[in-house]
Amino acid sequence: MSKISESKYKNFKADREKFPKMENGKPVIDLDSHKFTKIWQGPQHPGVTGNMSMEITLNGDEIVDAKTHVGYLHRGFEKLLERRKYIQGFTIVCRICVPEPDTNEYCYSAAVEELSGIEIPEKAKWIRTLNLEMSRIASFLMWIGGQAGSLGMGIIGQWTVSMRDFWLDLFEEISGGRIYHMYIIPGGVRKDLPKGFKDRARNLVTKTRKLLSDVERTFFNNSIIKSRLKGLGIITPEMVDEYGIVGPNARGSGKEYDVRQNTPYLKYNELDLNMLTATGGDAYTRAELRYQEMHQSLDLITQILDKIPEDGDIQAKIPNVINWKIPAGQTYIKAESTRGEHGFYVVSDGSKFPRRVFNRGASYTHAISVLEKLAVNTSISDLAGLMVSLHTCPPEIER
Amino acid sequence: MSLKDILSPFGVWKRAAQKPWTIKKPTKDRPGAENYRGFHKNDFEKCIGCGTCEDICQNAAIDLMPVDKVDTDMGDSGLRPLLDYGRCCWCALCVDVCPTGSLTMSNEYTWISDEAEDFRFIPGADETKWQNESRGYKRSENMQLIDYDRVEMSELEPENRDKTFIEIVKGYNKEQAMKEAERCLECGICVAQCPAHMDIPEYIAAIREDDIENAFRILYETNPLPEICGRICTHNCETACALHNNGESIAIRWLKRYIADQIPPEKYKEVLGTKHLADPKINKKVAIIGAGPAGLSAAYYLAILGYEIKIFEALPNAGGMTRYGIPKYRLPYDQIDKDINYIKSLGVKVQFNTRIGEDISLEKLHNDYDAVFAGTGLHLSRSTNIPGSDNKRVYFATNLLREVTLGNEIDVAEKIVVVGGGNVAMDITRTLARLQNKKYGKVQITATSLETEDIMPADREEVVEAREEKAIIDPGWGPKEVEIENGKIKGLHVVKCTSVFDDEGRFNPKFDKNQKKYFEADMVVEAIGQGMDLSYLSEEIKTGLKFGPRGRIQVNEKFQSDLKWLFVGGDIIQGPDVISGIANGHIAAKGINKYLL
């Protein structure tokens, strides 16, 4: 793995001492002065991740103020879950994040299992771990296409998104679905791995590594990318705790926090993985860190494939799901998604239906408060790149 | 910034020479994976229309609909799921919960039609291009979302019960009952199957809610003999249960017993809200002949309507065949009394030791009462009429069972053969086995029937338990002759029975005379069926009635005979079983009410 370059904290050079005038930490914006332009980026905009929008105030092409607007994608998942039996939940939670549904499935199922005191079989744990890592690589492959595309380099997206499709083929094999796998259910998983799956997965790991070397050559060893991303959207170590930043965004600023290692779940404590951190804090550092995490995921997948037991149950005995009541209680289950800590807080009142299901997605912090802060003083042309570098996923914000 | 960073990105061009992963115009469709969750398929042969798929679908994409090719049948609602692909999210939860495994998915994922209505379709009924596709999502064998295993019922061990008449089945405790109740899919197939149409899913739901009083009220809506039915009902509901297709059906009978056992007799009136019913409020009288299940059921429902009821019973106690035909170890007499005492407490009068036709004539009842309900049951036994069957030590099972209940000592030989394969045969076999054990310290009793073991009409558990009690069950033989020497029975000759019913399903046994067997015995008991005794009908009354097949009195759907004042029900009309009698009694009570109002 290449060593992460340490970029200096290099901000966009704009003299904000005199203009615009600041009051209580907010710029005073008088649109009638004709010195500002207010525009909306999104919700329909190729440079926006998913359906959200930025209300930005420009002075020339410099952003002086930014505000995130969400609500375009609200489907009321949390509320819907309160009217669903526990078993029906897995068909809904996966929709909270399209590129990486499995983390939702896992957290929800694990929460239900914890509340009802069910221990899932060993094999199911291994398969779940595999599934989560596969979903991480699939999500990262989509992200890197977006990161390059947001800077005008469409070719990376064409490569990686088609590679992602090969991963979706594997998902299709085990779960029967490509996008919404609906595979991890309370009690275990729905299907055993099909015959020959491990070999196909190993081949795909090799194929992906080969593609990633091409990506490294064209995306990371690229003077334009470097000049665009280095120094963009710097997250300082102080901001990490202040804003509650997690995942690669936090680790890119030196924070050693990875749920898989800090509080290992499933089989992560039986796997060999290192905490990957960097100290640059800018978009390029984050991109490089994610690139390394992709390799890490591929490495973990190889490890898991070697360790999955051939025999064993895939599902614990659960009561009749139609009348499944779960003892009153509450729990919070978290897992490391590609965007950072992803969690489900589930409250049961002892009935057939959850009293409350709350989903904590990393994007809530990243796309609302952090993005608003980082966008100021950047150029409008960098906003899309900045947004992707935070790897935001709007459905997580508006569950 | 290095020179490498400027040159390296041009590496993208090398891929221009590589074979692309995707092509513009695919020449053939890529099939979905082996497990793909594509369009639905439904195997009509397996589907029972239980609607569990409809219940679990969180998108309300499934509706159960009547289908041309399918009729309502035993354990089949006759409905089939209709899928609405405007709502379906292809989660396949319907496939995973399907208790019969009929619902599956194909791996087909393209379907083009300009008619929106096409996408609401009934898989299995409508022609589809994927209906014969073997690939696609199916429930994994090792993945279960419904519980197919019944909560085990604790019973007396064979060594502790083979000399006594203590009740064998101990009943569920609260925890066991709630666990068993949890398994219910609430499909309601059982309700249609139950002759009394008891609201089974509702009372099971009440057990889950631990609302036993409500459950008890639900029982009494359709069945005033829950202690009796909770022990010895023929439980057609369990045969129809959706879980029966792939696992063990819900223990509906034991759950009913659990409910009834929880309510002490002194709380009956309070729970059922019948405290005000002490005095009849309608000034009309109904006479009931026979205090069996049908008569008691009619009496109960008429009593709560406010009629003055009097039951005439030939024997010294109430319960009919449930008391005089079923041994105590299956149905203890105090439990029968619990049900009956409550009915009596509603003002129902019972006159025992009074045989209509002998002690009082039916005509007199007609004169004294506004309506009469006759549920006289099947108390005459049929004989094999084989040579030697006129010996004094050839007995009828029902007569022996009645004597045991009456407390009289009966003849118990050292070696006994029982002829018959129904529950009565098992009852007498097991009763005599106990008596033999007491008297001789060992069991030497053999039960033989025409039917082979797989088609024996007796309940499976009866056969198993009889064997546990060391009785020999040797089915598949037809009795030929009782061998008698000096007036004493030596044994029973039998020949192999090759088939019991003919192609049209009529009773027409065929024998293979070359295969013979001989059972040594000092005593033979016949338990091959019962007949009715309608001697209480005078010639004059008979002329006013119509008789149907097998000499049964013809009645309308309210069990009213051609003599408008005479209602008939129970085993002499339908069955024979307790629950049909209860159902008849209930309907007849409504009929009598309509007739008298």
Image: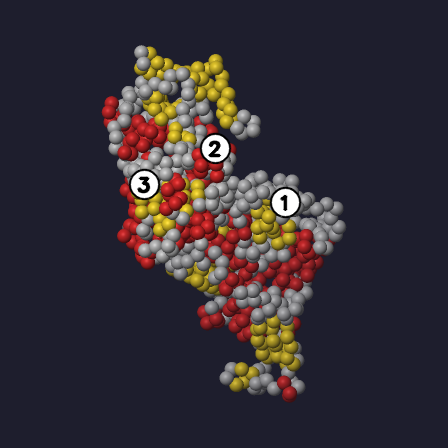
Residue A193, image x, y percentages = 54, 43
Residue at left 24%, top 23%?
Answer: B440
Residue A39 sits in quarter: bottom right
Relative to B366, does residue A335 appear above or below in the rendering?
A: below
Say which element carries label 1: loop
Mark whose residue sits in front, 3 or 1? 3
Residue farthest along the top direction in this orientation? B486
What residue is disc 1 on?
B68
Left or right: B239 as drawn, with respect to A66: left
Sequence order check: which comes first, mark 3 or mark 1? 1
Mark whose residue sits in front, 2 or 3? 2
Q: Disc 2 and disc 3: Cα gap in Å?
A: 26 Å
Kind of residue at disc 2: Gly
Residue B143 shows in this picture: no
Residue A166 or B300: which is nearer the viewer?
B300
Residue B567 or A221: which is nearer the viewer?
B567
Callout 1 environment at 10 Å: few (<14), some (14 to 19), or many (20+)? few
What residue is disc 2 on?
B551
Say which element carries label 2: helix
Marker count (numbered): 3
Q: Disc 3 and disc 1: Cα gap in Å?
A: 48 Å
Callout 3 environment at 10 Å: few (<14), some (14 to 19), or many (20+)? many
Residue A81 shows in this picture: yes
Q: Which mark is residue B318?
A: 3
Residue B103, image x, y percentages = 57, 45
Q: Disc 2 and disc 1: Cα gap in Å?
A: 37 Å
